[in-house]
Image (cartoon, rainbow, N blue to C red):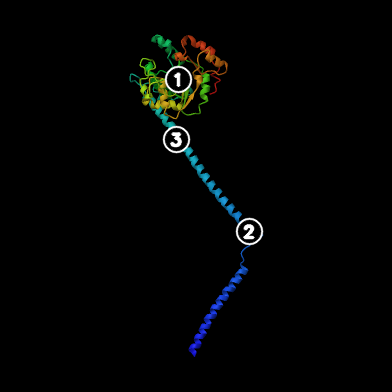
């Protein structure tokens, strides 16, 4: 009896436990539904709160983005400033190296007989805006007795001290070598912004030359002149025969663009480049071609200045009357002014810029 009664009590107790659990679960679900209802999205208070939270999140994200962009901008600004500083330092070092090499080059220049030439590297360089070489090419001068010409030059130099004597032997086929010696010597003596070569049988208006060069003084590596591209002559019997014509391709080809040899100007950087590298610069038959070849592989700005190659009157006279005064005038047929000794004064009177032009030039 006790065993059965004890077993029944235990079974009844388990059943009631299960029922009690189910009732508790149901009651819990009911109470949860009542007190924790899902928020109504249409409720104005809930909508306002949600909108405020969204706006705060957008503002926070926008501030983060702007701060990131500002940080990126600051970093890029620092990189740019550092890059510019490095470039400036490189340019300064390059300039010092070029000047040092130019002085060393000038010291090493020797004359044809092996004796030292002008040791300009030991002298302080003179400042100038333009330094010019007037190359004597006139047939009339070559026809003059050397003793008479030499005495005339000595007298001029004694009075004005305006001649630069180069350690060089004159000759048509030596003009390229003469050009290298000129630039090497001139750079060593004169610290000029431009170096100009002019033939002596060309009429030159110095004021117009200075004003024109002044427009380009801020440009580095500048090569100014009347740019041309003449034929490469392979015939040995002609005056301007090019022995190395085969380097320029097939027969009938033309040279690369270069300034005509009567007058041209180069900036300080290019003159210094010639001075430094003169031992390895190649010489072609024609001086103007040689000069152009030295720049053809460099970052050089070629400026085609047509006022440097006007014709003699009436051409330069008409241009002067129209307000376009020429820098230089000559006859293409003679590579200079034909019969220059007789005619150059007349050319000057008709095509000159006026006596006060040099002093009023816009440097």
* Count of residue discs: 3
Question: In x, y percent, where is residue 150?
Answer: 40, 11
Q: CA distance from mark 3 to mark 2?
A: 61 Å
Q: CA distance from mark 1 to mark 3?
A: 34 Å
Q: CA distance from mark 1 to mark 2?
A: 84 Å
| Observer-nearest of 333 and 170 | 333
Kindly identify the residue that appears in the image at 53 percent across and 44 percent down.
Answer: 73
**Element under label 2?**
helix
The image's mark for residue 90 is 3
Residue, disc 2:
49
Kindly identify the residue that appears in the image at 49 percent across and 90 percent down.
Answer: 2
| Observer-nearest of 120 and 20 | 20
Decide if residue 53 is on the left or right side of residue 346.
right
Residue 168 appears in the figure: no
Residue 54 appears in which quarter of the rendering?
A: bottom right
Kindly identify the residue that appears in the image at 43 percent across and 22 percent down.
Answer: 186
Question: In x, y percent, where is residue 99?
Answer: 42, 29
Residue located farthest toward the bottom when viewing the structure as drawn: 1
Question: In x, y percent, where is residue 38?
Answer: 61, 64
The image's mark for residue 260 is 1
**Element under label 3?**
helix
**Who comes first in sequence, dot 1 or dot 3?**
3
**Who comes first in sequence, dot 3 or dot 2?**
2
């Amino acid at each position: 009896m006790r065993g059965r009664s004890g077993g029944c009590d235990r079974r009844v107790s388990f059943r009631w436990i299960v029922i009690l659990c189910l009732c508790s679960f149901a009651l819990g679900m009911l109470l949860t539904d009542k007190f924790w209802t899902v928020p109504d999205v249409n409720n104005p208070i809930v909508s306002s709160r949600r909108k405020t939270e969204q706006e705060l999140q957008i503002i926070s994200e926008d501030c983060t983005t702007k701060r990131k962009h500002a940080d990126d901008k600051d970093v890029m600004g620092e990189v740019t400033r550092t890059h510019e500083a490095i470039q400036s330092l490189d340019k300064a070092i390059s300039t010092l190296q070029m000047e040092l090499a130019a002085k060393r080059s000038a010291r090493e220049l020797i004359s044809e007989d092996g004796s030292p030439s002008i040791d300009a590297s030991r002298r302080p360089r003179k400042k100038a805006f333009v330094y010019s070489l007037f190359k004597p090419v006139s047939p009339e001068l070559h026809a003059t007795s050397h003793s008479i010409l030499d005495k005339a030059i000595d007298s001029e130099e004694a009075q004005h001290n305006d001649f630069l004597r180069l350690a060089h032997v004159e000759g048509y086929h030596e003009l390229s070598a003469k050009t290298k010696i000129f630039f090497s010597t001139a750079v060593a003596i004169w610290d000029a912004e431009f170096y100009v070569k002019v033939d002596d049988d060309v009429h030159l208006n110095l004021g117009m030359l200075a004003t024109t060069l002044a427009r380009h003084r801020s440009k580095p590596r500048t090569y100014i002149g009347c740019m041309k591209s003449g034929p490469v002559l392979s015939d040995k019997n002609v005056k301007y025969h090019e022995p190395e014509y085969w380097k320029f391709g097939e027969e009938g080809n033309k040279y690369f663009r270069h300034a005509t040899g009567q007058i041209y100007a180069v900036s300080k950087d290019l003159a210094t480049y010639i001075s430094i590298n003169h031992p390895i610069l190649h010489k072609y038959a024609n001086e103007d071609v040689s000069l152009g070849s030295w720049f053809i592989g460099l970052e050089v700005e070629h400026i085609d200045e047509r006022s440097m190659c006007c014709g003699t009157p009436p051409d330069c006279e008409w241009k002067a009357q129209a307000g376009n005064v020429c820098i230089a005038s000559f006859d293409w047929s003679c590579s200079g002014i034909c019969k220059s000794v007789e005619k150059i004064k007349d050319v000057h009177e008709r095509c000159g810029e006026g006596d006060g032009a040099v002093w009023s030039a816009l440097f």
